[in-house]
Amino acid sequence: MPGSVFSLEVNPKIPAKLARLSELANDLWYSWDRPTRELFFRLDPALWDAVGHNPKVFLRRVEEARLVEASQDRVFLESYYRILSAYDTYLLEPVRQHDQPTLGHDDLVAYFCAEFGFHESFPIYSGGLGILAGDHCKAASDLGIPFVAVGLLYRQGYFSQTIDGEGNQLASYTDSDFADLPVLPVLQDDGNEVKVEIELPGRVVMAKLWVARVGHIRLYLLDTDLPENSEEDRGITHRLYGGDINTRIKQEMVLGIGGVRALRAAGLHPTVWHINEGHAAFQILERARELVAQGLDFHAALEATAAATVFTTHTPVPAGHDIFPHELMLEYFRDFIPQLKLDTGAFLALGHKPAEGSGFNQTALAVRGSRYQNGVSRIHGGVSSRMMVDLWPQVPPDENPMTYVTNGVHIPTFLAQEWMDLFDSYLGGEWRNKLSDAAFWHRIDQIPDHLYWSVRQALKSQMINHVRERLAHQHRRNGGSEAHLDRLLRYLDPLDPSILMVGFARRFATYKRATLLFEDPERLRRIISHAERPVVFIFAGKAHPADRPGQDLIRNIHAIAHQPEFEGKVHMVEGYDMGLARALVYGVDVWLNNPEYPLEASGTSGEKAGINGTINLSVLDGWWGEGYDGHNGWAIKPLKTVDPFRARQEEANSLYELLEEQVIPLYYQAGKYGYSTEWVKKSKHSMKTLLPRFNAARMVGEYVNKFYRPAARQGVRVTAEDFQGAHALAQWKERVQVAWPGVGITRLDQAPARLQFGQQLRIELAVQLNGLQAEDVRVECLFRHHGDLRNREQPRSYLFRSEGEAEAGGAHRFVLNLEPETCGRIDYKIRIYPYHELLAHPHETGLMLWL
């Protein structure tokens, strides 16, 4: 039909009784409070689904008559007032967790990240990093920690995914209308919007500041889509991770430099700065620039900046770290470098990582500009310490500053409401205050097995319904027949959820090995085609639009799913998002994860599954390396070899054996009640062991205790009395760096081969300090009994004392008198490293010599 189409949205007037619905819609508290979302759903279920579960859009489009009707509905009003009471109580009194950590009265943590995943209605995230950042914020709110977050407000978040009839992933992007999002402009006292300036080559870019309310905390977001910017610069914050390397460096300048300026403009004064992944590392340069402008030299400014900075890395492979060419850095920072009072070489050295050659490495900058660094699981902490070893070149990897805090998931967001209701009945409401109390969660055993199983089956039925709807829509859109659809869905019966179902849902990157299950198709066919013990596998996930090998994995699984022998028993579901992820982790029986070891930094999807009673079947990598106890799931033990083909073959065999010999027989070991009591026992054990250990409250509590409080104190130490500590530490480090090549150790005594028990071992050393003082170093002896210095047991450490200058050569004499406490073989080593009382970590200089 010819003619123009004009759109008009008619908005309802919200009745006075329901006026606070708008307040609930503008606080991301709704993203983890299901009763709040349920309130909107009850008003109009179809509209709620149509608007993507977005409460702001919902309130603009719902029929006014329905709101009026609800305002006169006593049952609805009772729910409404109950939710308002819970909301007000939450804001008034943070939940008190077991052994809750605290910060000082004047402290404030500023948490920078390139993406945040709170809910599908707020699409400024792409995957695991964003969901983790969202969970971190939610837990900080729950714990009442003084905390603000900083990110970018994208017009286009990550893409929406469809899969065509050939298995090709199709990506589509949709621009957000900021009026649809739970954000408001930050205003100055005079009512004008807060904007900050970021200098780019030959121009200044303006960024507007928005704020989102997240319970007790605030999320500040920068937006360059402003009329005063050029078309090119308006697009800086247009798409999450979009564009080329020029777009990426501009985004990271807006996030890092603009983020610091935004907090200043908002009148906030953080005492701890947390960089979550290297995208925000430029904040280090901006904070140092501020201090140089106050009169500090750069090295003292860097010490003052780094003292209060925490850096978390999530990437286990070098290719995952941002590296900008030197010429690009010099182009974009040509006017910034003089403000640091550095020459070009010294500036580029801040991002130099010797093991990776040229280029400005954001992770290297983040490490140099922080004093607290961590990976996101025990295994990943070790991987990261080895990856970063060239930044502390003389320090053994297991002793450098890189440590770990294992990721956790936000329980109120990812624990199904059905479990919450059951816990309320059998554990009492206090379970919400006991999230990290491992002993408390043994009470799960008090829940009758038949009730526990009924919840699992109810969630499984809901998941089957959800997956059926998605598969049906996908099939019909691609022109498939109804008869074919019936064949595809014949094992997905929500009225009979008795078939064993295995889920695999995550980003489709090659190292996650989504197709490991299909290494031996004939063996898999035999496993899943048993007439009395069928198995269904459900796959979901997105590949980055530029990741062709990742998209090939989706295409391969789609093709396998349409082979006659696998039809109906293997599904590749499109449209992976938070909603589908919740359905799968709630409902499948087994959660499959088989990454290439040790490339899984943490992986939180299995944690979400485990807290809902889904049992993990996973390679012992990431969080599962800590979570598996031999009884709460199944472990594929990685083959630690340099041959990836052999590892793949062996680990695929291990997966098949576990399915054949343990998983499937246990599930179908039905007793007199019609279900496997041993399966329920394992499921309960999984839930009670994983929930208290892998929750975000525990995670954020660890950050407070291990990093935030120490960083706040260290910041005060080095900045007190007009930055005396920062000056002293910078000067001392410079002196040590110059002198260290001339430092050496010589043993003066003859090392005895044997010693009688009760005798004293006296070790005498001549240490050439090359101009340093005795108090500038620690000379240390590491003792270990019955083994060598490489085993996992920590050696005992004994410090030598200085006895002045030795007789010859101007060296200093260091002496240790030690009486061994046990008989047997003793191995010991002697080393020296720089020491200063203001160091945040004893080995942060990266310097160490061994005798």
Image (cartoon, rainbow, N blue to C red):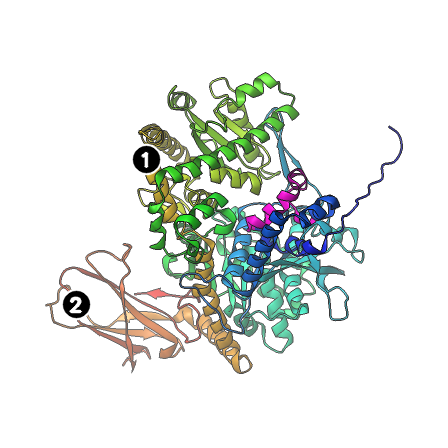
Q: Is residue 324 visible?
A: no
The residue sitting at 65% across, 51% down in the picture is 248
> Label 1's element?
helix
Q: Looking at the figure, which quarter contains the C terminus?
A: bottom left
Residue 793 vs residue 758, the one in the foreground? 793
Where residue 105 appears, as percent x and y from the top left, is: 52, 73
The residue sitting at 74% across, 59% down in the picture is 205
The residue sitting at 41% across, 57% down in the picture is 434
Identity of the amino acid at label 2? Glu
Which of the 4 quarters of the picture holds residue 613?
top left
Identity of the amino acid at label 1? Thr
| Residues packed near mark 1 inside 10 Å, few (<14), some (14 to 19) or many (20 plus) | some
Q: Which mark is residue 821?
A: 2
State whether residue 24 is above or below residue 806.
Answer: above
Q: Main secondary structure of the magenta part?
A: helix
Q: Is residue 212 visible?
A: yes
> Label 2's element?
loop
Residue 107 vs residue 352, the one in the foreground? 107
Where residue 525 appears, as percent x and y from the top left, is: 42, 21
Residue 193 vs residue 806, the one in the foreground? 193
Q: Residue furthest left?
A: 756
Measured in 3D between alpha carbons, the distance from the residue under mark 2 to the one under mark 1, in whole angstroms, is: 52 Å
Residue 63 vs residue 470, the one in the foreground? 63
State whether residue 213 is above or below residue 815.
Answer: above
Q: In the rendered structure, which segment of residues is drawn in magenta?
A: 32-57
> Mark 2, mark 1: which one is toward the viewer?
1
Left or right of residue 741: residue 473: right
Q: Looking at the figure, which quarter contains the N terminus?
A: top right
Sequence-wise, the earlier of marks 2 and 1 is 1
- Asked if residue 47 is among those painted magenta in the image, a careful observer would answer yes
Left or right of residue 162: residue 228: right
- Residue located beneath label 1 in the image: 677
